C-alpha cells in the first residue's frame, strides 16, 4: 500500500501521508494540509473524519464487529463482569484475580459521597430529570475532592467516579421519591450494590436476584465503550482543555442525554408505549418514520457506524428474553418491539437505508424488567459508558500528538461592513 496520496490543487501536486490501523482502516493524515496548501477540509458531523488514533475499541460497522482491547463483545458479555471490563478498558489488560480483588476494595473505599451533597439533591425540583442531576453532581464532586494532575491522584479520581456514580444515581432516585437514602455495602458486588441502593427499603428489604445482577452486568458491559461516539467526542474535546476529570465527565453525561444518542433508550419505551396504549399501530410508526415530511424517526433504529445489526442489540435481545423468562414477567412492550423490528427489517426503506436495531432498541425493556424507572434509563447508559469515557480521556491526554481541540471553519457571513449609528438604521 502506498504510504501517501497525492492531491492536485490549482495545478500543484501535494503528497499527504496515509495512516493504516491494525485492522486495515486507512486515513489520509491532513494535519499539515493548511500549512502546505492554505486549504482546510469540511466534514459536518465528522462523518468522514477521524479525530485520533485509539487502541481501546474496534468497531466494524459493515460486519457488525465490536471489540474492547481486541476481545469480542460477545465473549465479554458471556464470560466477564462489568468490574472486570472497567479494568480492561482503563488499564488495557484483563486483571489478574489479585488485581480485580484489589480494585473491588478500592471501589468500596470510595463508594460513599460527602453527606453535604445531600443538600444539593434535596434542592432540585422533584421532577428534575436524573441526567441533569447526574451531570451537575459529577461536576460538584470537584468541590468535595481535590484534583491534581499526578498519576496517583488521577487513579484515585477514576476509582471515585466509577464507584460514586452508582451512589449518586441511587441517591437521586431515592430522594426524588422522598425515600430514605440507602448506603453502599462492602459485602455486595458492584451491580448488586447499586440495585440494593436503588430498591432496598426499611419495610421491604431488597432480595438480590443473581439473574437480575447478571442482566445488569451484561447491560453495563454492552454500554462500556463505543470508540468516538458523540459523548466520547465531547469528553475528549472538553478534556483537551485540561479541565479536571469531574467536569470532563459531566460534559459526556450532558451529551449522552440527547435523544439521538443515549436518550434513545427512554425514547424507545415512550414510542413502544404508544403502541401498547393503542395510540398508534406499529405500521403507522413505520410509515411515519419513512415520511420525509415527518420529523419522527424510529427510536432505537439506525446508527452512524453500524450498517448491519448492532451486535449489542443481538445480545440485549437475548438478555431481554432470559430476564423476562427468569422473572416470569411478560412485557407487552417486548411484543411491540419484536413486531416493529419484524416489519421494519422487511421494509425496503429500512433495508435501503441500512437501518437496524441499535443497542437502545431492547435495552429499555431489560431495564424495565429490573425495575429501573424510565427516566433513569440514560443514567444507566452513563454508568455503563463511564469507563469508556475515562479510558478515552486518559488515552487522549497521554497521546504525544495531544493538543487542545480547536477546529477551523468556512466563514459564510457578511463581508466587511461599517458600524451604523442608531439614527441611520431602519
Ligand atoms: C447511540 O455513535 C455511537 O456509537 C452511538 C451509540 C454509542 O454506543 O455511543 O451507539 C449509542 O447513540 C445509538 C443511536 C441511538 N439513537 C437513536 O436510536 C435515534 C434514532 N436514530 C437516528 O436518529 C439515526 O439513525 C442516528 C442519529 C443514530 C444516526 O444518524 P446519522 O448517521 O447521522 O444518519 P442520518 O441522520 O444522516 O440518516 C441517514 C438516513 C436519512 O434518510 P435520507 O435523508 O438519507 O433519505 O437514514 C434515515 C434518515 O432520515 N434515518 C432514519 C432513522 N435513522 C436514520 N429514518 C427513520 N428512522 C430512523 N431511526
Image (tube, rainbow, N blue to C red):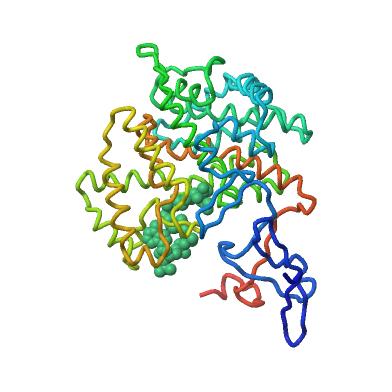
Residue 350 visible:
yes
Residue 260 visible:
no
Q: Which residue is drawn at 41% across and 26% down?
A: 211
363, 418: nearer the viewer: 363
Q: Horizontal and vertical percent for residue 84?
A: 60, 31
Q: Horizontal and vertical percent for residue 145?
A: 68, 27
Q: Would residue 238 be found to the left or right of residue 424 on screen?
A: right
Q: Is residue 223 above or below residue 206?
A: below
Q: Horizontal and vertical percent for residue 128?
A: 43, 35
Indicate which quadrant contains ligand 1: bottom left
Image quarter of residue 155:
top right
Quadrant showing the N terminus: bottom right
Q: Which residue lies furthest to the bottom in this view?
A: 11
**How many discs mark residues in the rendered view?**
0
Q: Would residue 315 be found to the left or right of residue 76 on screen?
A: left
145, 256: nearer the viewer: 256
Q: Would residue 325 be found to the left or right of residue 358 on screen?
A: left
Q: Residue at x 64, y 21 (%)?
A: 101
Q: Which residue is drawn at 49% across and 32% down?
A: 217
Image quarter of residue 163:
top right
135, 190: nearer the viewer: 190
Q: Is residue 342 above or below residue 49?
A: above
Q: In this view, does 86 lie above or below 357?
A: above
Q: Which residue is drawn at 50% across and 21% down?
A: 193
219, 276: nearer the viewer: 219
Q: Residue furthest left?
A: 278
Image quarter of residue 50:
bottom right
Q: Horizontal and vertical percent for residue 150?
A: 79, 33
Amino acid at each position: 500500500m502506498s504510504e501517501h496520496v497525492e492531491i492536485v490543487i490549482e495545478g500543484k501536486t501535494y503528497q499527504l501521508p496515509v495512516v493504516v490501523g491494525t485492522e486495515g482502516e486507512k486515513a489520509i493524515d491532513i494535519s499539515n494540509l493548511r500549512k502546505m496548501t492554505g486549504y482546510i477540509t469540511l466534514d459536518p458531523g465528522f462523518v468522514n473524519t477521524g479525530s485520533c488514533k485509539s487502541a481501546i475499541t474496534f468497531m466494524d460497522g459493515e460486519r457488525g464487529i465490536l471489540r474492547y482491547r481486541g476481545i469480542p463483545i460477545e465473549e465479554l458479555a458471556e464470560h466477564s463482569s462489568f468490574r472486570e471490563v472497567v479494568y480492561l478498558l482503563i488499564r488495557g489488560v484483563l486483571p489478574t484475580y489479585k488485581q480485580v480483588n484489589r480494585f473491588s476494595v478500592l471501589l468500596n473505599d470510595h463508594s460513599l459521597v460527602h453527606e453535604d451533597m445531600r443538600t444539593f439533591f434535596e434542592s432540585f425540583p422533584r421532577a428534575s430529570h436524573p441526567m441533569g442531576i447526574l451531570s451537575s453532581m459529577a461536576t460538584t464532586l470537584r468541590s468535595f475532592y481535590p484534583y491534581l494532575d499526578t498519576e496517583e491522584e488521577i487513579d484515585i479520581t477514576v476509582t471515585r467516579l466509577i464507584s460514586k456514580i452508582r451512589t449518586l444515581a441511587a441517591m437521586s432516585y431515592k430522594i426524588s421519591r422522598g425515600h430514605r437514602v440507602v448506603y453502599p455495602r462492602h459485602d455486595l458486588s458492584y451491580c448488586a450494590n447499586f440495585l440494593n441502593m436503588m430498591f432496598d427499603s426499611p419495610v421491604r428489604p431488597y432480595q438480590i436476584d443473581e439473574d437480575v445482577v447478571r442482566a445488569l452486568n451484561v447491560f453495563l458491559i454492552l454500554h462500556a465503550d463505543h470508540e468516538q461516539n458523540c459523548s466520547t467526542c465531547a469528553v475528549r474535546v472538553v478534556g483537551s482543555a485540561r479541565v479536571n476529570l469531574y467536569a470532563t465527565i459531566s460534559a459526556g453525561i450532558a451529551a449522552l442525554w440527547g435523544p439521538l444518542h443515549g436518550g434513545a433508550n427512554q425514547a424507545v419505551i415512550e414510542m413502544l408505549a404508544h403502541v401498547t396504549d393503542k395510540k398508534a399501530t406499529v405500521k403507522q410508526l413505520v410509515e411515519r418514520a419513512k415520511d420525509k415530511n415527518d420529523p419522527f424517526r424510529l427510536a432505537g433504529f439506525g446508527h452512524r457506524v453500524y450498517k448491519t445489526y448492532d451486535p449489542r442489540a443481538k445480545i440485549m435481545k437475548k438478555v431481554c428474553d432470559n430476564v423476562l423468562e427468569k422473572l416470569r414477567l411478560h412485557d407487552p412492550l417486548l411484543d411491540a418491539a419484536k413486531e416493529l423490528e419484524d416489519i421494519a427489517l422487511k421494509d425496503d426503506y429500512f433495508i435501503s437505508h441500512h437501518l437496524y436495531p441499535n443497542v437502545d432498541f431492547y435495552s429499555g425493556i431489560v431495564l424495565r424488567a429490573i425495575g429501573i424507572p424510565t427516566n433513569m434509563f440514560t443514567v444507566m447508559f452513563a454508568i455503563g459508558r463511564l469507563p469508556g469515557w475515562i479510558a478515552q480521556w486518559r488515552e487522549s491526554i497521554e497521546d504525544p500528538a495531544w493538543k487542545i481541540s480547536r477546529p477551523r471553519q468556512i466563514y459564510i457571513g457578511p463581508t466587511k461592513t461599517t458600524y451604523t449609528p442608531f439614527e441611520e438604521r431602519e
